[in-house]
Amino acid sequence: MSDKYVSLSNLTLSYGKTVAVPNLNLDVVEGELIALLGPSGCGKTTTMRAIAGLLQPTSGSIAIDGRDVTRVAANKRGIGLVFQSYALFPHLSAFENVAFGLRLQKMSDAEVRKRTDAGIATVGLTGFEKRKPAEMSGGQQQRLALARSLVMEPKVLLLDEPLSNLDARLRLEMRTELQRVQKATGVTMVFVTHDQSEALALADRIVLMKDGKIEQLGTPHELYAKPATAFAAEFMGFENIFRVEGGNLVSDSGQLPLGFNAVSPMLAWRPSGVQVGRGPFSGTVSASSFAGGHREYVIDTPLGEIKADASIETPEVPIGDTIAFDLPEAAARPLSV
Ligand SMILES: Nc1ncnc2c1ncn2[C@@H]1O[C@H](COP(=O)(O)OP(=O)(O)OP(=O)(O)O)[C@@H](O)[C@H]1O
Ligand SMILES: [Mg+2]
């Protein structure tokens, strides 16, 4: 098992004079599912296109399975691609869609049938072989696109927002399905998403990107529990982020005294980490909504709006009323800027 199965070294990717990705270094471990996560325009697709061989790097190199492929053509890299639009052949049956790439390899009919049947079974579409893509649901089409790539036995499978065309329920189903297929086949997957929860649920490791650079790289648990910067914290659901200056929490709107010592220049709290109903501070409830397991408050405070989740056990405080709260040390996440 290689720790550098896909290795990007000092990779700079540009469109004309515009540098989209400056000097990227990333090693993907063999058999892992790594997620590229980040806001629109941060360079996720650009990075994928470079790995696939669809975009020639301005500088730097790409190695796959120990071989430098920087100058190797896209179709000779052993890479499978699954993109947002599945690009299935509408006039071909599900079986023929999956068999298409194998037939191009001049394989025997028996071998094509065997591998196609196995691929279709892997994604749970046995029985759908004769259907045309238009006669299948969005999730089934997505799985068909996955099977079509898998049967080619790629070294690496690149998936760029493959679930973004699906409705919420199907997305959840396909997440589990993708994970299952990945563990079953052991194929190395690079998965692009701008959906934090999708990355957390699916990935072995997450690469959080900002402006073409890696902001933070770690396991979902590491990123979720220990975002290092304000950008990472915001992405991981810390909605209350403040500067620390001279013993105070400071925002653009004002300040509050910090009740404990902090050495970091910033502190962040999740809504669930804010204590409501009691505490040294008070504010005015400006919004309140029932969220099933808890109640979500927006509180107007000297620091501006604070988002806080309250237990449904505690009595509801109506909008416009004063509410006590605390930003406790135990739930505070220290951040560098
Ligand atoms: N063909 C192109 N020509 C010029 N600039 C481009 C081109 N494609 C992308 N860019 C620019 O490169 C940067 C990175 O784009 P990229 O498509 O990699 O973003 P992304 O992270 O995939 O975003 P999204 O989540 O919106 O898909 C952006 O600033 C974008 O405007
Ligand atoms: Mg993209």
Image (cartoon, helix red, strand yellow):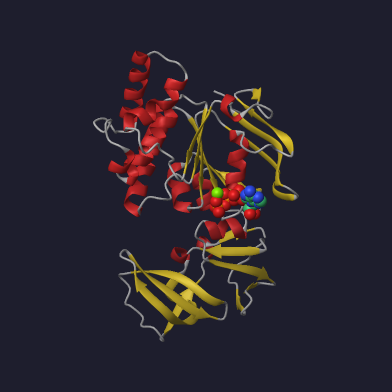
Residue 238 image offset from top left, x and y in percent: 52, 62
Residue 151 is situated, as x and y percent measured from the top left of the image, at 41, 25
x and y, in percent, of residue 189 in the image: 50, 34
- Is residue 193 or residue 315 the one in the foreground? 193
Q: Is residue 211 above or below residue 49?
A: below
Question: Picture coordinates of residue 3 (x, y %)?
Answer: 59, 28
40 horizontally vs 128: left or right: right
Q: Give the position of the N terminus as an image quadrant.
A: top right
Q: Answer above or below: position of 145 versus 169.
A: above
- Name which residue lies at 59% across and 30% down: 74
Q: Residue furthest front?
A: 91
How many marks overall? 0
Q: Is residue 305 above or below residue 72?
A: below
Q: Nearer the viewer, residue 220 or 147?
A: 147
| Vertical side of 104 occupied by 306: above or below | below
On screen, residue 322 versus residue 258, left or right, reads: left
The residue drawn where x is 33% and y is 18% is 114
Residue drawn at 42 percent across, 21 percent down: 103
Q: From where the camera sits, is residue 236 visible?
A: yes
Q: Is residue 210 visible?
A: no
Location of the C terminus by quadrant is: bottom right
Q: Residue placed at 41% from the left, 35% from the top?
A: 146
